[in-house]
Amino acid sequence: MKTTLRTLALGTAFAALMAGSPALAQSLTVALQAEPSSIDPQFATTGQNQQIALNMFDTLVRFSDTGGFAPSLATEWSVAEDELTWTFSLRDDVTFHDGSPFTADDVIFSVERVAAIENSPAPFAQRVANIASITALDDYTIEVVTTDPAPTLLNDLGTIYIVSDEIGDGVGSDQFGFGDAAIGTGAYRFVSYTPGDRLVIARNDAYWGDVPDFEEIAIRFISSDASRVASLQAGEVDMIDAVPPNDLDRLRALDGVEVISAASARMVYMGFDQGGETTPMVTGTDANPFLDRRVREALALAIDRQAIVSRIQFDSGEPAGQFGPEGIFGHNPDLAPTEYNPERARELLAEAGYPEGFGLTVHGPNDRYINDGIVTQTVGQMWAQIGLDVGVETLPFNVYSPRATAREFSAFLFSFGITTGETSLGLRNVLATFDEARGWGSNNRFRYSNAEFDETLGAAFAEFDEAERERLLQEAARIAMEDFAITPLYWEGNNWAVRAGLVFTPSPDGRSLMTNLSSAD
Amino acid sequence: MVFIIRRLLQAVLVALVMSVLVFAGVFAIGNPADILIDPEATQAERLRLIQQLGLDRPLYEQYFIFLGNLLQGDFGTSFVFNRPALHIIFERMPATLELAFAAIFIAVVIGIPLGLWAGLRPNAVSSKAIMAGSILGFSLPNFWQGIMLILLFSVTLGWLPVTGRGPVGEFLGMRSSLFTLEGLRHIALPAFNLAVGLLALVIRLTRAGTLEVMPQDFIRFARAKGLRERRIIFIHLLRNILIPVVTVVGMSFGGLIAFAVVTETIFAWPGMGKLIIDSINVLDRPIIVAYLMVIVVVFITLNLIVDILYSIIDPRIRLEEAGQ
C-alpha cells in the first residue's frame, strides 16, 4: 500500500513537472524591484506602496481601462445641485478578510483615519482635506459634504483604501506589517511580512470580484536588476517586474519565458529654466536664451525621440508629446511628439539670434529612471549637432534633485508619473505658475509661467461636467505644448517577464499588481 | 577596569563626532524633502511635512534636538518608514551578523589549509595555482564575483538558490537561518562572495607565516626529536602562525559587517547593508546616523575584545599599555 501511495505521489509530481504549468502548483513566487515603506495602505501614496496595497485592499472606485472611473466598493455616486453634497451607494455583499461585513462605518473610519496618520512623507491627507463631513445614511449609503465644490472628489476620496473599523482607533502603521491590522476586502489577504525580504499574501476565497487563480503568492523584493533576472532564469521566481531594457531581447528569445511590455504614464522630459533674465548653466550669451520660444522649439526639434526609445531603451516605451498617454483622462489626441528636424532647429536658433549657438551644460540624474544617464548624454549630443557647445553632467538623484529644486540648472531631465488616472495633477504641479500661496507649480523647477494656461487649468479644476473637464485639460495641454514649456521625451516603458503558463495583463497605471496575474488555462 | 571605562568613553566621543559628520554630510548633499515628498503633493502639504519632519529648522537646531532625544535613548524616527530607526536596524542585524559569521567561517576553514599547503610546498604547481587564485580573489570586483557565482551555480548548474535568505530555525534559543538546511543552501553563495577577499588574505598570511616559521630552530629540534610531521605542522607550526591570522580575522569582522552592502544588494539579503544603501538613496538621515553609530559601537567593541584577548593569549601585553 505504502509503495502504491508513493508511486502515485511520484506520478502526480511527474505529471505536474511535465505539464510545466505553475497553476498546478497553486503558489507562486514573484520578484519586485521596489519594496513598500509600510504595509499600511493609508501610510503613503508612493507607487511601491500602492502596488502592494491594491492586492489586499479595495477603494470606492477604480480607474477604468478606458479612462475615468469604474465602480468598486461603491456602486453608484451622484452630486447634488449645490455641488457640495455627494451620495455614494456601497456594495452590500462584501466581507473583510476576518469575516466581518463591510459597511458604511468602515468607509467613515477609513476616511477619518487618513487624516490622523502623521509623519508620512507622501500622505493621503490632502485627498480628504476638502471633506467637511461624512455620514452614514444607512449601512450601505454614505453622504459626503465638501467645503468647496470638488469636481475631483472621485480622484481623491475614491482612491482612499478602505480598512476595517474593527482594528480600532490609534492603530499605528506598524500594526499592519507586524500585527494583525492588515484586514482588507481585496482579492488577496495578508499572511506575513519580512522587511527587506518578502511579503506573503494568500487568495481571498470570499472575494466579491473575480477570485484569483493562485492559492498563495510570495512577493520577494530584489532590487538588483541582474539578480532579479537571474532568479527568473533559474526558475526560482515565476514573474519579475522592471526588466532592464538591456535584457529584453535576451529574455524574449528564451523558451518558457514571456515578456510583456507596455508604455507607462511616467513622462520623461527636459525642462528649460525660464525663471529670470539670466540662467546659471548657459555661456556665450548674457541673456537667458530659453525665454525665447523659438529656442525652446529648436531644442525640441533637435531631439530624435524615436532613436532614444529604440536604441537606448530597446523599444520599451513610446515617444511623448504631452503629459498623459492614450487612456489617461486629459490626453489630447491632436498632440503628436515633436518631429525630429535638425535643419529647422538650426534655422530657428539663427532667427532667435544664436546662429553660432551658445554654451550649455545639460544635467540629468544617473540612478533614478531607466538608463537616465545615457538619455541625458544623448540629448546633449543631439543639441551639439545643431550647433550648441554642450557639456553634460549626470548626478545621483539624491544630489541631483535638491539642486534642481534650488534652480541651479538651465536644461535638465526630470519626469512625472501619473498615478491618479488623469493629467490634472501633473499639469498643476509641473507646468502651472509657481505660487506657494495657491499651492500650484510645486514641481515647476524651471518656472514656466503662462496666464492663459493657468486660467484654463483653473477652469478644469472647477468643472463638474466630465466632458467639459476633459476638454479643458486637453486645451491646457495644448497651450503648454505649443508654447514648448517643456520638451517631452518619452513615456517610460514598463517590462515584466513571466514563466510560460502565466498571463500578466498590464493595467493603465503600470503597476505590478498580483491581481493582474492569472493562469493561462 | 579603568581601561574599559576609558574605552567606553572613547566610544561615546567617536560616536558623537560621527553623528556631527553625518548630519553635516547629509545636509551638504541636499534637502531630503525633495526626494521624500510625493511629487503629487500640493505646496501646503509640502510645507506641512517639512515642518513635521523638522527640516525647516537650521541644522544646528536639528542636531541639538537629535542629541536631546538621544539622551533619552531615542535615535530618531525614520523619515521613510516612520518607525524608530534603531528598531529597523536591529530587525535587520541578525541577517547581516550570520552572513559575516558564515563568511569568516569559510575564510578560516578554507584559507588556513590552502595557505599551509602553499607554504609547505612553495614550488609545487598546486601552490602556485592557489597563490594565483588568491590574487584574483583580491582584485576582482566583489559585485562581479557575486553575479558570476549566481550565473554559474544558480542559473547554469541550478545547485543553489539565486537570492534571499532561507527559513529561520531555532537552536539553543538563537534564531538564525544557519540552523536549517534550506537556510544553509541560501547563505552559501552570499557568504562565499563576502568571504573571498578575507579568504585571499588568510591564505597569504598563513603561507607567509609558514614560510617564515618552517626554517626556524624549534621546528628543526622537533624534527630532530623524531616528532611526526603531522604533529609538527598542526601543533608547533600552526600555533605560531595563528596569532596574526586571528588578529586579522577579528579586525575584519567589523569590516565584513560594514561592507556587506554590495553582497547584500546582489543577493537580496535582508540585512543592514541593503537598508543603509536604500536609506542613503533617499537621504533618510535618522537611519543613516543610527546605522553609523551602531557600526562605531561594533568596531570599538571588537577592538576592545581583541585587546582583552591579547592580554589573555600573551600575558606580557598589559591592557594599560595596549590602551595608550
Image (tube, grey):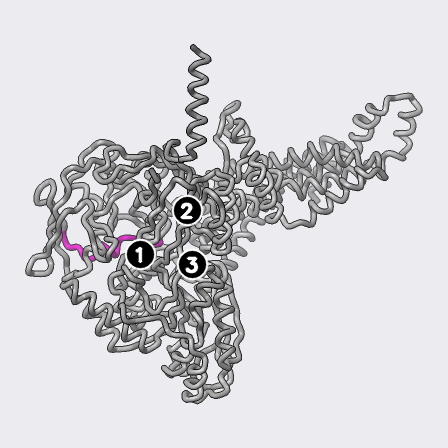
Quarter occupied by the C terminus of chain A: top left
Q: x, y percentage for residue B47?
A: 32, 62
**Label 3 to label 2, Cα distance in Å?**
23 Å
User: Which residues fall within the magenta stretch?
Assistant: A121-133
Q: Please tell me which of labels 3 and 1 falls first in the chain.
A: 3
Numbered disc 2: secondary structure: loop
Q: Where is residue B32 in the image (x, y as percent from the top left)?
A: 43, 58
Q: Is label 3 or label 2 in front?
A: 3
- Label 2 marks which chain's residue? A
Left or right of B27? Residue B263 is right
> Which disc is residue A35 wearing?
2
Residue at the spot 26% in from the left edge and 39% down from the top edge: A184
Q: Quadrant of the N terminus of chain A?
A: top left
Query: How busy is the neighbourhood of tag 2: few (under 14 within 10 Å), some, or many (20 plus)?
Result: many
Can you tell which of label 2 and label 1 is closer to the viewer? 1
Viewer-proximal residue, A264 or B177?
A: A264
Asked if marks 2 and 1 touch (Cβ < 8 Å), the reply is no
Query: Label 2 amino acid?
Result: Glu
| Residue B195 visible in the displayed image | yes
Disc 1 crowd, CA 10 A, few/some/many (<14, 14-19, 20+): many
Q: Which amino acid does label 1 sit on?
A: Thr
Relative to B10, residue A18 above or below: above
Q: Do labels 2 and 1 share a chain?
A: yes
Residue receiving disc 3: A316
For residue B112, side relative to residue B299 (left or right) = right
Seen in the picture, residue B131 relative to A77 is either above or below; the reply is above
- Label 1 belongs to which residue? A419
